[in-house]
Amino acid sequence: MTRPSIIIVGSGIAGMTAALDAVDAFDVTLLTKSDLAQSNTRYAQGGVAVVIDAMADPGAPRLGDSVASHVADTLVAGAGLSDDEAVRILCSEGPGAMDELIARGVPFDRHDGELSHGLEAAHAHARILHAGGDATGAAIAYALIERLRESAVTVRERTTAVDLVVQDGRCVGVTLLGGEELRADAVILATGGAGQLFPYTTNPEVATADGLAMALRAGAVAADLEFYQFHPTSLDAPGNFLVSEAVRGEGAVLIDAAGRRFMPDVHPDAELAPRDVVARGIAQQMARQPGVPVRLDATALGAEFLARRFPNIDAACRAQGHDWSREPIPVAPAAHYYMGGVRTDAWGRTSVSGLYAVGEVACNGLHGANRLASNSLLEGAVYGSRVVEALVDPQPVVPFDDEWLAPLALELADDPEAQDVSRSDLQQLMWDAAGLARTGDDLRQAAAELRRWRSPIVTDAKAAEDANLLVVARAVVASALAREESRGGHYRTDFPQTDPAQARHSSIGVRHA
């Protein structure tokens, strides 16, 4: 008897978890446009937020933490938009997901035989598991890759999916670069984020919004696309190397050009305020001292501790000529994580039958307007398993409510005199108009400029990526223009206050002629 088949597009923690969970019941093909290790997961530093007290590990310390506390912290970070049920699922199922990662070989750091745990911004407890100091994502990625290589999953590396195949309203496969079609009973998008929308990003080059763009073109509804998280502290040097939230959690502070801490004047939690607050605080201070970056002072932590706890950041700093144990390092905000994505329910279902989405490409309302630090890897692990449960043992379909099904209209047609899109020009436009601070005038001008660019003919992988970036840039700008308030990762200088009447999700879909 032929087994049902699924195609998974993407090789981060969400995609690989789904593949490993599904392989016993499905014929699984996993596609990735680079090699398996190239994903945002691979580059994640800080760790995984999870309530250690709820884990099965008998050696885990008892910290007085609770699932309820993790839920509360996540809801506060979400700035009034997080879906309560999605948050409860993440926090309550997280401990079991971490037990599964440990069983699959992820070597989380331990001290005296017990799981180590760190503190990060906006967490009430030290609940961040890490591996290799600041190499948590790499440890997870390589452990899952090893399990994947041992499994019956068909892996196709360096294979670019350019569109979804939809017949009679149902997704039945994907089209690959070159025209080949792969068919399956279901498709799971796990393509990650969209950091390459911006010139300054902590994301790798593969994060080009591919799954989101393909889903929009296929008729799926997307949600909350105006909410992009800018990490406060990337190294102010080419490549924008991420300087983990955990460094501030260990006691590092931000200082201005005069060597004075400025974040206590911005928020009571200072350097450990929510990410959007710290990022804007840094940007505002940089504006007050033009040409001079702010600096992160970790010198009090000592050379031995920094090298042991943050070996990759230590190496990156030294490669740029900085001894951060002796001198503060220059830092600046950079695009980091997308709260918006393809609209899904709590099982990864999208508004297109047969199409599922999980991880950063998806939006089930979990993160609201601003993601809590270290909830992203947890999301991939928890929801990567849940999407397979929906396939193996289908739950009753949860209909999207009217709010989700009344999207803004996204126009895909180009201006008749449109010019070929330039990725660098698009990135700079997005940084200037849809970055940390936005105005209606800038967004309207950006929308007009984006209409004057046309998608390239897809003859290679870069052209496919550029086409996807253009689609998503238009959707981001339209969504940001429609939200006339400031909330979480979306800040409008012309509407600087949070409006309780706008405590609702946005949604957008393609306008069909």
Image: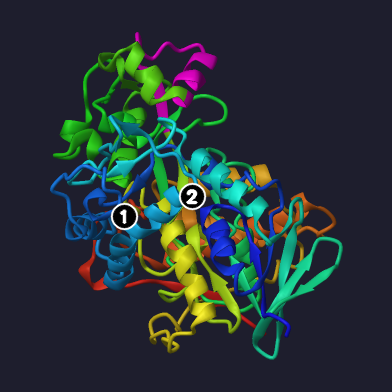
Residue 22 image offset from top left, x and y in percent? 57, 69
Residue 201 image offset from top left, x and y in percent? 52, 40
How packed mark 1 is, by other alpha carbons closer than 10 Å (few <14, some 14-19, many 20 or more), is many
Q: Nearer the viewer, residue 312 or 440?
A: 312
Q: Nearer the viewer, residue 289 or 88?
A: 88
Q: Residue at x 55, y 73 (%)?
A: 356
**Separation of residues labelled 1 and 2 (CA atoms):** 17 Å
Classify residue 430 as left or right of residue 379: right
From what the image shows, is residue 303 above or below residue 44? above
Three-letter amino acid code at the position of disc 1: Gly
Classify residue 407 as left or right of residue 461: left
Q: Residue at x 36, y 19 (%)?
A: 306
Residue identifier under label 2: 433
Q: What span is in magenta?
A: 312-332
Q: Secondary structure at mark 2?
A: helix
Classify residue 185 as left or right of residue 179: left
Magenta stretch holds residue 317: yes
Whether residue 292 is visible to the viewer of this picture, yes or no, is yes
Residue 363 image offset from top left, x and y in percent? 44, 67
- Mark in the foreground, 1 or 2: 1
From what the image shows, is residue 25 above or below residue 332? below
- Say which mark, if any, is on residue 344: none
Magenta stretch holds residue 473: no
Q: Secondary structure at mark 1?
A: loop
Residue identifier under label 1: 488
Q: Residue at x 50, y 19 (%)?
A: 315
Q: In the picture, which quadrant includes the C terminus?
A: bottom right
Three-letter amino acid code at the position of disc 2: Ala
